[in-house]
Amino acid sequence: MSDLTTLLEVGGPLTALGGGAAYTRAKHPAAYWSTIGLPISTARLLGSYTSVMEACGLTVAPSRLRVLAVKATTRREVRPVPPRRGIIRPTSTGLRIRLRLAPGQEPADVAASAERLRHAWGVHAVYVTTVKPGVVELRLVGFDVLRRVRMPRKADTGLLKVPVALREDATAFVRDYRTVPHQLTLGATLSGKSMYLRHLVTGLARQPVALVGIDCKRGVELAPFAARLSALATDPDQAAELLPALIKEMEDRYDLIKARQGIAPGTPDEEITSDIWGLPENQRPVPIVLFVDEVAELFLVATKKEEERRDEMVTQLIRLAQLGRAAGIYLEVCGQRFGAELGKGATMLRAQLTGRVCHRVNDEASAKMALGDIAPEAVGAACAIAPERPGLAVAGDTSGGWSRIRTPYLSLGDAAEICRESAHLVPDLPTLKPFRPDVPPMPVKDSRPVAAPRPVAE
Ligand SMILES: Nc1ncnc2c1ncn2[C@@H]1O[C@H](COP(=O)(O)OP(=O)(O)OP(=O)(O)O)[C@@H](O)[C@H]1O
Ligand SMILES: [Mg+2]
């Protein structure tokens, strides 16, 4: 009887504790990591560092000096040496540790063992980055950070830099227009392209940047941001008028740069080497970001007459992509597919769009359109995205690598609210004035009349 009581007394709380831990791990992984996961993984790492490195083949033979020192001072056997490690730096999503590579090792050797290290130390994933020659950083991620995305508080922000999504190694994926001026975002329907655009629009809304939209879905995605947009086209007809205005703005900016350089107007654009960033701040025109949602709509034609208009628009888009950067005009193009089947100019325009983000796609060919020239594994990773995770995407890096990213959820209402709050930041651009969208009036929350109606006396 007393055994049973003891069992209940000890087992009951233990079961409750275990159940609580399992619940926290499933429902609140970040809290679980900070309270339970981090101490356990740290203890595992410290306790098993040498043996794990040895099992992964990351140790080297000890130096002769070390062998002599060990033999002289102890009777222990001389064991191979693992890479020297720095201090463990815990974070809210995992931990970081720097390793000094032993002579003859390269970062790829450690990266090849990442999967083995993750199992040995019981973490969700291990990523390896090179800090400087001879030093790598192991980034251990404690749980699947892309399941419920929370952006890190410290992210690289600044003019034309938007931390738009979270990478799988828990760092922010920053869309930096100054380094990658134009980008193509592809994905099947409901894959999260417009959510990605929404984050970019709201991120840029608070900066001194002109935002221009072409949304051939009658404006359903971009019209809610009308308060902050300098121009909006909601069908191909309007786009056909807006694009020449942007070309004109670009040419004016080139004239401005030429004038500043003392070159006579009329010099061909290609001979200008500087850009608007070289102009003094009081003369520098504001950067313009052109968002194009569902780009294929601009390419599709039904009649011969429309074909001419389409060719013009495509040429204008190509010109903006080719020459826009120096004039501070950047393109953000979204579509479901973007291949040669769209007709003349499609692949040429695609080649101008440096940045690539590919959401879930329905076939490998679509993924290849976005990522084919980056890496075959990136194409495979994009094809493996599940429909249950909208917003998950594969992004190409400027370094030629790629990573999985996911945007946090942001409702259309909240995004529209941010745009309304920053409406005073819409820059004054006379060329785009005719295209400024009408701002829908704020919905009236309380529709009760000011004075209570009194029934007319009978
Ligand atoms: N990061 C995310 N987290 C949670 N839900 C998301 C995320 N991204 C998108 N969604 C949801 O997925 C759905 C589709 O997103 P979105 O409209 O951005 O897709 P889309 O690719 O633009 O589709 P379409 O081609 O039909 O316009 C929306 O209901 C949206 O709320
Ligand atoms: Mg969309």
Image (cartoon, helix red, strand yellow):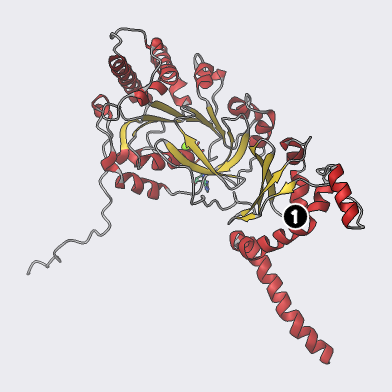
Camera-side residue: 214 or 341?
214
Position of residue 34 in the picture relative to residue 57 (left or right) = left
Where residue 125 sits: x, y (%)? 69, 48
Camera-side residue: 69 or 159?
69
64 vs 429: above or below: below
Residue at image point 39% right, 46% down: 415
- The residue lying furthest to the front in this view is 72
137 vs 371: above or below: below
Within 8 Å of ligand 1, the CB of disc 1? Answer: no
Locate the N terminus and report the quarter of the image it occupies. Answer: bottom right
Where residue 414 sits: x, y (%)? 39, 50
Q: Is there any visible trace of residue 302 in the rendered image? A: no
The residue indicated by pointer 1 is 121
- The residue lying furthest to the bottom in this view is 1
Position of residue 134 in the picture relative to residue 435 (left or right) = right
Q: Is there any visible trace of residue 49 in the rendered image? A: yes
Q: What residue type is labelled 1?
A: Trp
Position of residue 335 in the picture relative to residue 280 (left or right) = right
Camera-side residue: 369 or 288?
288
Q: Please rate how many residues cluster around mark 1, counting C-alpha atoms within 10 Å: few if below 14, some from 14 to 19, many from 20.
A: many
Locate the C terminus and report the quarter of the image it occupies. Answer: bottom left
- Asked which quadrant contains residue 440, the reply is top left
Position of residue 423 in the picture relative to residue 310 (left or right) = left
- Asked which quadrant contains residue 447, the reply is bottom left
Q: How many labels does the image show?
A: 1
Residue at image point 87% right, 52% down: 70
Where residue 420 sits: x, y (%)? 30, 45
- Asked which secondary structure carries label 1, the reply is helix
Where residue 284 sits: x, y (%)? 30, 27
